[in-house]
Image: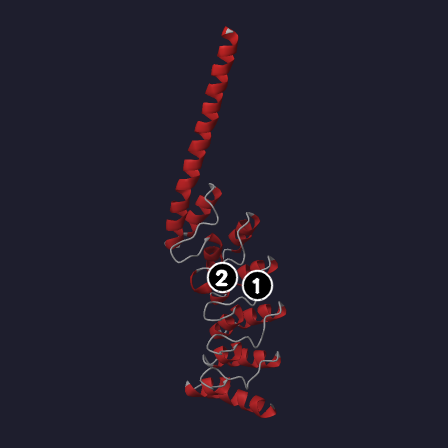
Amino acid sequence: MKRARVLEMGAAIGLATVLGVALCAFLYWKNLGPELSRALDQGRLPAVKELVRRGAPIQTRGREGFDALFLAAALGDSAFVEELLQRGAPVNRKAAGGFMPLMAAVRNERKEAVQTLLAAGADVDARTHEGWTALMWAANRGWLEGIQLLLLEGAQVNARSVRGYTPLMCAAARGRLLVAKALLARGADPTARDVEGRTARDAAARRGYRDVARCLEPALQDR
C-alpha cells in the first residue's frame, strides 16, 4: 500500500514537471513573437534571423503585415529566403496593400531572391489591391533582367491594373525605352488604353519621353 502511494506521488511529480517544462517552453515561444514583430517593423534582418532560429513563429507579421520572408526578399538575402521556405514560410502570403515577397524582391531588383521565390512556386501574376503585378513593378523600375525572368515564367505581358495600366504603360510612363522594346517584342499591346483613355504612347509623350513615344508610334500603326 505504502509503495503504491509512493508510485502515485512519483507519477504526480513527474507529470507536474513535464507540464511545468511545457508551460515554460510555451511562454518562451510566445514571447518571441512580439520580439520578432518589433524586429520586422524596424527592418532589422540580423535580429529577425536570430529570432526565427530561436523558434519564433515564422508566421509573425509586423505592423504593415509583412513577415520574415517578405523582409528577406526585399533585402535580397536569398539564402535566408531559402531557409524560410524550407521552414514552411508561405511563398504567396500578402502584406499590406496586397504586396507579396516576389513583388518586394522585384521592386528592389534582387535577382537571386526572385529566382528562389519563383522556383518555390511564387505566383508570377499575383496582384496588389491596385491590381499591379510583379511585371508592372519590373517595368516601372526599368529592370530589364527582371522583365526577362518574369516573362520566362509566363507572366502576363498585357495584365491590367485597376486603373487599366499595363506593363508597357508602366515602362512608357517612366521613359524605359529598352523595357518598352522588350515588352513589344513579347506581344505587349500598344493600343491598350487606361481608364482615362490613354495609351502607352500617350503616357510617354505627356512626360516628355520622346524616344519612347517615337518607338511606340510604328507599333500603333501596325495595329
The residue under the point 45% across, 71% down is: 130
Relative to 134, does residue 9 appear above or below in the rendering? above
Q: Is residue 62 left or right of residue 179?
A: left
How far apart are the alpha carbons under marks 1 and 2? Answer: 9 Å
Residue farthest toward the top in the current orientation of the protein? 2
Dot placed on the residue nearer the N-terminal end, 1 or 2: 2
Residue receiving disc 2: 100
Amino acid type, residue under disc 1 in the picture: Asp
Given contact means CB atoms under 8 Å apart, are the residues at marks 1 and 2 in contact? yes
For label 1, the crowd category at 10 Å Cα-Cα, with few meaning under 14, some 14 to 19 and many 20 or more, is some
Q: How is the image coloured?
A: secondary structure
Say few, some or many: other residues with alpha carbon within 10 Å of mark 2 (under 14 / 14 to 19 / 20 or more).
many
Residue that extends furthest to the front in the rendered view of this protein: 1
Q: Does residue 188 lie above or below 116 as drawn?
A: below
**Above-or-below relation of 106 to 43:** below
**Where does the C terminus fall, quadrant-wise?**
bottom right
Residue 131 lies, in percent from the top left, at 49, 71
Q: Position of residue 155 (x, y in %)?
A: 59, 70
Residue 1 in percent (x, y) is at 51, 7
Please provide percent x and percent y for residue 76.
Answer: 49, 59
Identify the element where label 2 is drawn: loop
Q: Look at label 2 and name its amino acid.
A: Met
Q: Which mark is residue 54?
A: none
Residue wearing tag 1? 123
Given residues 79 and 137, the one toward you in this image is: 137
Q: Residue at x 46, y 64 (%)?
A: 98
Q: Nearer the viewer, residue 92 or 35?
A: 92
